Amino acid sequence: MTTIDLLYGKGTKRVTPPPQARPYVIKKRQMPILEDPVLAIRQALEAPLGAPPLETLARGRATACILICDITRPVPNGLFLRPLIETLMRAGLRPSNIKVLVATGLHRPNEGQELDELVGDPWVTQTVEVLNHFAERDEDHVDLGRTPVRGTVVRIDKRFVTADIKIATGLVEPHFMAGWSGGRKVIAPGIAHAETITTFHNSTFMAHPRAANCVLEGNPLHEEQLEIVKLLGGALALNTVIDEERRLAFVNFGEIVQSHLAAVDFVRNYAAVEVPRKFKTVVTSAAGYPLDKTYYQTVKGMVGPMDILEPGGDLIIASACSEGIGSRHFAEAQRRLVELGVDGFWQSIAKKSHAAIDEWQTQMQLKPMRIGQVQLFTDGLAKDDLALTGVEVVDDLDAAIARSIERQGSPDVAIVPEGPYVVPVTAA
């Protein structure tokens, strides 16, 4: 009997397709794991792409700001923050002039024990100041003007703007809007003002066919992010890639655009998986902890396998949702989806110049809903929140798979255990 473990919460959720099923499991090729991650990080800092070594760059500079992603990303901050900070200190920067800024975007702040977990190294919190970005605090931001083509007002956290050394850090993985996460995305939306975020997350951007997983060329979000980096005057980036067991597979450092593209070139060979055909039953996850803490983030898992879902097929997703639905803003957008339906919700946002906070995630949920039936397995949502999902809720994954096989008249089942960290694409 075939069993497959989906990433779910801090562990896995086992599925056992019925005997008549023909499972097609979609995983990354095995990544090469770095034997000495800390040594690899130090070597990256000494040999950057498109920039001098960090210690050389930092000599004679007074201040530095290092961006880290928020708790929704399993970034190995505990591996690289100390080497980064120690390099800056060797160059002469005082610890009091080095700030680590959590790039929350419009997400909630990470504080207390959660912040310690995020940073991953008590030495860091004992040595330098670690702060959260708050996108709705006007006084925390600097106006850098407008992007030249689309005219987005660019307001960025002044702690980063005014730093002599600006470093974005993050995880490079598929992203369902921006193509790939990391690099320029840690700056915008990471530390952008709400006005900036809600502009280039409006319905026009989100509906663009190139605003999709694994797509950079012609992607309007990516293009806008590059323009924001130019208005900022450039930055540095430390980019990481991890395997499905959260082990470091790749790290580089350097000029933010060049180093990010090099990381994308590496991870693309693993994360984008060619599949020979579409399926009427697709089973996936929301990538487990920390990504599946909320239903908001679960939408990424729904979008990930869209290319292999037959029209009218069933997309079954497992997500722990241990923190519930997500923000009150997202809950309100979901409430409107449930009340108005797919077409009605789209009509309500289609002409807005600025998105309401978090409604872009609901808009992205429309994409798989237009292809087939989305079904959710979770044990983390209260009854009221389940009603806001806008999808069918199932309480037994195995039974849901069996019903789908019978309803669809096909025994073939695509299974994506790692969720949105793997993007299956049909062969051209």
Image: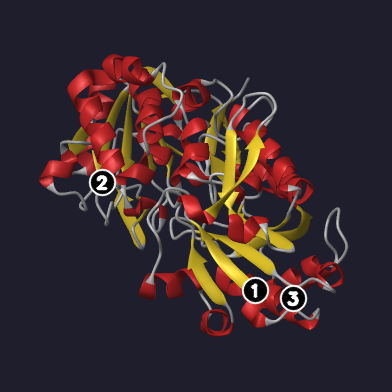
Q: Amino acid at mark 2?
A: Ile
Q: Spatial distance from mark 2 to mark 1, Cα to Cα? A: 35 Å
Mark nearest the camera among 2 and 1 is 1
What secondary structure is marked by label 2?
loop
On residue 98, the disc is 1
In the rendered view, tell whether residue 36 sits above or below residue 257.
below
Q: Quadrant of the C terminus?
A: top right
Residue annotated with mark 3: 88
Callout 1 environment at 10 Å: few (<14), some (14 to 19), or many (20+)?
many
In the rendered view, tell whether residue 364 sits above or below residue 347.
below
Q: Name the N-terminal-most of marks 3 and 2.
A: 3
Q: Residue at x 52, y 43 (%)?
A: 422
The answer to whether residue 172 is left or right of residue 295 is: right
The answer to the question of whether label 3 and label 2 lie on touching residues, with beta carbons closer than 8 A, is: no
Residue 424 visible to an observer of this rendering: yes
The answer to whether residue 360 is left or right of residue 244 is: left
Q: Amino acid at mark 1?
A: Ile
The answer to the question of whether label 1 and label 3 lie on touching residues, with beta carbons closer than 8 A, is: yes
Q: Name the N-terminal-most of marks 1 and 3.
A: 3
Q: Residue furthest left?
A: 383
Residue annotated with mark 2: 325
Mark nearest the camera among 1 and 3 is 1
